[in-house]
Image (cartoon, helix red, strand yellow):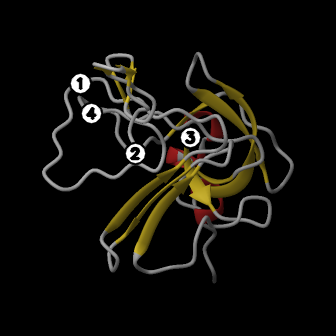
């Protein structure tokens, strides 16, 4: 005679699939609509890191997730994010490129074959470094370089006959 699984060990109760229904940023909690239509209460999500080193990347509404339910209890569950879906397809398709794609179109990628780290920002984007920068190779800029409020392209010098035209 076949034995029924105990509720606490039934895989269908321990591991459930669903989509993020709502996100509480202040509480770092989300609710999940499970595949059977049940909506969970507020649950913690799993971050990449949550110790002395921490990350913050809240789930998106509609993002496919796996709900891990200790003892089969939805209320004790934690949300494992990152299940690709039609609504949120993978950001890439390469074995050698690791990348992050952001809601505004910004993209951070590293190509191990090309040895290239690229941070592409959308129009109007700003990249800020707080701290010192040390460059051991050539630094190339297609736009202007401004240091201490002085433009590398547009600065002029006083000459005996007036002002210089600026760099050519």
For the residue pair 133 and 40, the one nearer the viewer reads as: 133
Using the numbered discs, state the Cα–Cα distance from disc 2 to disc 1 in whole angstroms: 25 Å
Residue that numbered label 1 is attached to: 131
Position of residue 48 in the picture relative to residue 75 (left or right): left
Position of residue 85 in the picture relative to residue 146 (left or right): right
In the rendered structure, which disc, 1 or 3, sits on the residue that comes first in sequence? 3
In the depicted structure, whether residue 38 falls above or below residue 25: below
Residue that numbered label 3 is attached to: 77
For the residue pair 151 and 39, the one nearer the viewer reads as: 151
Q: Residue furthest front?
A: 161
Between circles 3 and 4, the one closer to the viewer is 4
Residue 154 occupies which quadrant of the picture? top left
Helix, strand or loop status at disc 1: loop
In the depicted structure, whether residue 122 falls above or below residue 36: above
Position of residue 147 in the picture relative to residue 142 (left or right): left
For the residue pair 14 and 88, the one nearer the viewer reads as: 88
For the residue pair 35 and 99, the one nearer the viewer reads as: 99
Using the numbered discs, state the Cα–Cα distance from disc 3 to disc 4 in whole angstroms: 23 Å
Residue 21 occupies which quadrant of the picture? top right
- Coordinates of residue 133 in the picture (x, y in percent): 21, 35
- Coordinates of residue 162 in the picture (x, y in percent): 38, 18
Q: Residues within 10 Å of mark 1 (few under 14, many from 20)?
A: few
Q: In the rendered structure, find residue 163 and report the number of the disc placed on it.
A: none
Q: Residue furthest right?
A: 37
Helix, strand or loop status at disc 4: loop
Residue that numbered label 2 is attached to: 48
Residue that numbered label 4 is attached to: 53
In the depicted structure, whether residue 40 falls above or below residue 120: above
Residue 86 occupies which quadrant of the picture? bottom right
């Amino acid at each position: 005679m076949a034995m029924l699984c105990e509720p606490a060990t039934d895989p269908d109760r321990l591991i459930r699939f669903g989509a993020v229904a709502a996100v509480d940023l202040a509480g770092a909690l989300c609710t999940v609509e499970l595949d059977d239509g049940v909506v969970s209460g507020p649950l913690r999500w799993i971050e990449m890191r949550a110790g002395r080193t921490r990350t913050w990347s809240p789930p998106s509404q509609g993002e496919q997730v796996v709900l891990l339910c200790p003892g089969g209890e939805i209320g004790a569950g934690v949300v494992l994010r990152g299940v690709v879906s039609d609504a949120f397809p993978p950001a890439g398709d390469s074995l050698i490129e690791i990348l992050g794609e952001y809601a505004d179109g910004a993209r951070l990628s590293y190509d191990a074959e090309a040895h290239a780290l690229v941070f592409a920002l959308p129009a109007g984007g700003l990249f800020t470094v707080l701290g010192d920068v040390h460059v051991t190779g050539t630094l190339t800029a297609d736009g202007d370089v401004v240091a201490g409020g002085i433009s590398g392209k547009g600065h002029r010098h006083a000459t005996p006959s007036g002002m210089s035209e600026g760099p050519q």
